[in-house]
Image (cartoon, rainbow, N blue to C red):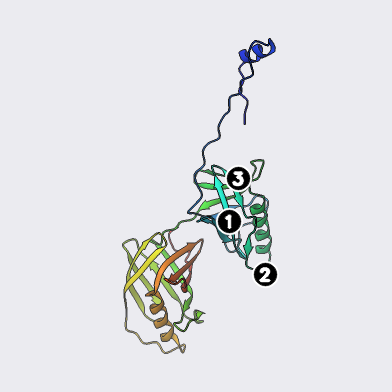
Amino acid sequence: MKLLITAAFAAAILQGCAPLVVLRQDSVPQPPLNDTSWVLASLPAGPGLGGPQPTLRFAAGDATGSDGCNRFRSTFVATNGKLELGPVRATTQMSCPEPVAGRAAALNGVLDQARGYRVEAGALLLVNAHGATLASFAAQPDTLAGTAWEVSAYNNGKQAVVSVMADTRLTLEFHDDGKLRGAGGCNSFSGTFVAEGNTLRISRLATTRMACQQPEGRMAQEAALLAALETVATGHREASRLELRTGSGALAVAARLLATARP
């Protein structure tokens, strides 16, 4: 808070002719954080940003994301620049090599110290109790149109999520015109998609008719991927990761962003 006192007021005060009047200079109102998603852009007090990109999402009273090593979840309250996280933050317990582990520890320290936030030029700044910037985050793109992905895992239809076979490559391309195209490891396929928020519907899948014998299981993998895509009800994009889930919340397909995709 700044004190704005004119010279005339100061003289009057010294002469005992007028009471002290303090004018407040209000801070710039800050937008709400609910239903926003962010990716770490800078961490001044920590290691660089190589490796998996840390994320932060605010929704329905929960702050969730990844520190680049482990996933975390806590409650949050954000009101016009003030931010309360926690008091308890639940995390997974994976072990990660340096420098990923060091950066994760630094980010968790930021979350412990954060007492406020500012949104400036589209970036989210977490600040401590004194207003000093602890870390900055860039807005996370949440659209699928115009992006391309490489599948890393899929539901095999036997109540299990399995990794993609070695020497095969499965891809997904979400085009601006609502068309879905991809590679199933043997055949190419196409279809349509409709995305509204996190809701995602994939339909009208059709494939070419090649038969690929090697490696063994290649055709079964392709059939399982296509079947999994037809069960998708939601899509959640987080940094360079994409999770497609069924209506019951089961993971149908996991993928990572291809470098050739549009930002």
> Disc 2 marks which amino acid?
Ser
Earlier sequence position, callout 1 versus callout 3: 1
Image quarter in which the N terminus is found: top right
Dividing the picture into quarters, in which one does residue 170 lie?
Answer: bottom left
The residue drawn where x is 54% and y is 42% is 80
Residue 49 in the image, given as x and y percentages of width and height:
61, 58
Q: Is residue 116 above or below residue 16?
A: below
Earlier sequence position, callout 1 versus callout 2: 1
> Disc 1 marks which amino acid?
Thr
Residue 224 in the image, given as x and y percentages of width and height:
42, 81
Earlier sequence position, callout 3 versus callout 2: 2
Disc 3 or disc 2, which is closer to the eye?
A: 3
In space, the residues marked 1 and 3 are separated at their CA atoms by 15 Å
Residue 13 in the image, given as x and y percentages of width and height:
66, 14
Q: Secondary structure at mark 3?
A: strand
The residue that disc 1 covers is: 75
Q: Residues within 10 Å of mark 1 (few under 14, many from 20)?
A: some
The residue that disc 3 covers is: 116
Return the mark for residue 124: none
Q: Is residue 248 above or below residue 106?
A: below
Q: Is residue 235 above or below residue 114?
A: below
Question: Would you say 56 lies left or right of 204 here?
Answer: right
Disc 1 or disc 3, which is closer to the eye?
A: 1
The residue drawn where x is 51% and y is 63% is 240
Q: Are marks 3 and 2 in contact (CB under 8 Å)?
A: no
The residue that disc 2 covers is: 95
The residue drawn where x is 32% and y is 80% is 208
Q: Secondary structure at mark 2?
A: loop
Disc 1 or disc 2, which is closer to the eye?
A: 1
Q: Are marks 1 and 3 in contact (CB under 8 Å)?
A: no
